[in-house]
Amino acid sequence: MGHRHSKFPKLIHKINKATNDKIRNTECPQLNKQDDLYLDRMQVLHNVMRCISNGNFKAPVDEQLREGSAVVLDVCSGTATWLSEMASDFPQSTFIGIEKVPMYPDHKPRNIKIIQADVLEQFPFSGDKNQNSYNTFDLIYSRLNFFAFSESQWKNHLIKEYIRVLKPGGYIECVEGDLNADNPGAVTEQLGVVVEKILVQGGRSLSLFMKFNEMIESHPQMGKVTRSEVVMPIGSWGGQIGELGLAIMLHMLSGLQKGIMYHMKLNEKDLDKLWDDYKIEWANLSFGKNICMVFFNEAGFLV
């Protein structure tokens, strides 16, 4: 692929500026989640993911959504971008989001409800207190949440909660990114080792991406797991999607700058050079990030 002119130069510049500001501000390694720049990044990320995935979901629930009989849950719904788009596309169905930190817009489609809650506690959907399960949702959607929680939190709580509130015959869809890049260059490979150390120290499991299927299938009430992968291009070789992907990657990595500087023994000048080398490498090498989409349904249907 050759270099292409991007349709989003102002937005890419805005995201890159946010990255540079974060890198130089050691007192504030992460932007406030209500910051406009964060919201812009989430919107761009949504657009990129939808484009490379060829849609907003893969689970076979189109008919239910169109008929208006579906109830959908978005776990860690964030800015509610995915929810809002789905609610607009399927106005007869019901969409619910869970988010601990309020960051969603005041104006949203009327078929959306956002619940402020901590997903590490019991999901706020309770039926009869004597029942172990409350079957509520036809589709539970989760995107880029793997590294937000530890493997133990996934195995001992989150997956169990997903299953508890899922209707028999309903679907769970998870969309996640692999930390490994296809055909990485020397800078990317070195940076990847450091990022891995930081995440492991934070209790995150890098193998979760590959063994999530097994964790799901270990539950007897769950049905077949379907897994598909696409590659998100990173860098100008990938056209406008690649340019946006690179801007997003830099913005995310800048949140780990303190750990990167510590493990690589870098000062601020060295860090600036690392980011420059990183951008050059991604611009000149044709590689990207694997994005995995898995969906699975609970065995058995209501009769």
Image (spheres, rainbow, N blue to C red):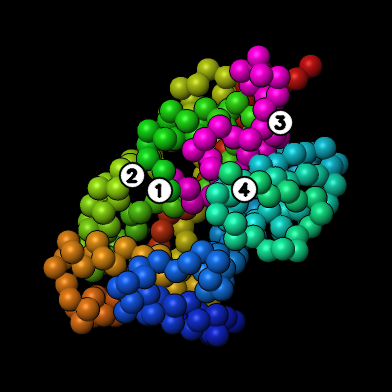
Residue 8 position within the rendered picture, expressed as x and y whole percent measured from the top left: 57, 81
**Mark before the other along the chain sequence, 1 or 4:** 4
What residue does disc 2 label?
204
Query: Of callouts 3 and 1, which one flags the residue occurring earlier in the amino acid sequence?
Result: 3
Q: Position of residue 132 (x, y in %)?
A: 61, 18
**What's the magenta region?**
118-147
- Viewer-closest of 20 and 279: 20
Q: Which residue is drawn at 46% across and 58% down?
A: 231
Q: In the structure shown, which secondary structural element does the residue marked by tag 1 occupy?
A: helix
SS state under label 4: strand
The residue at the point 62 percent across, 48 percent down is 116
Q: Residue 136 carries which label?
A: 3
Check if mark 2's residue and mark 1's residue have beta carbons within 8 Å: yes
Q: Which of marks 2 and 4 is nearer the N terminus?
A: 4
Disc 1 target residue: 147
Residue 222 can be seen, yes or no: yes
Instruction: Measure how far apart labels 2 and 3 are at the Cα level.
Output: 30 Å
Q: Which of marks 2 and 4 is in front?
A: 4
User: Which residue is tagged 4?
Assistant: 116
* Vertical order, 283 against 33 (above or below): below
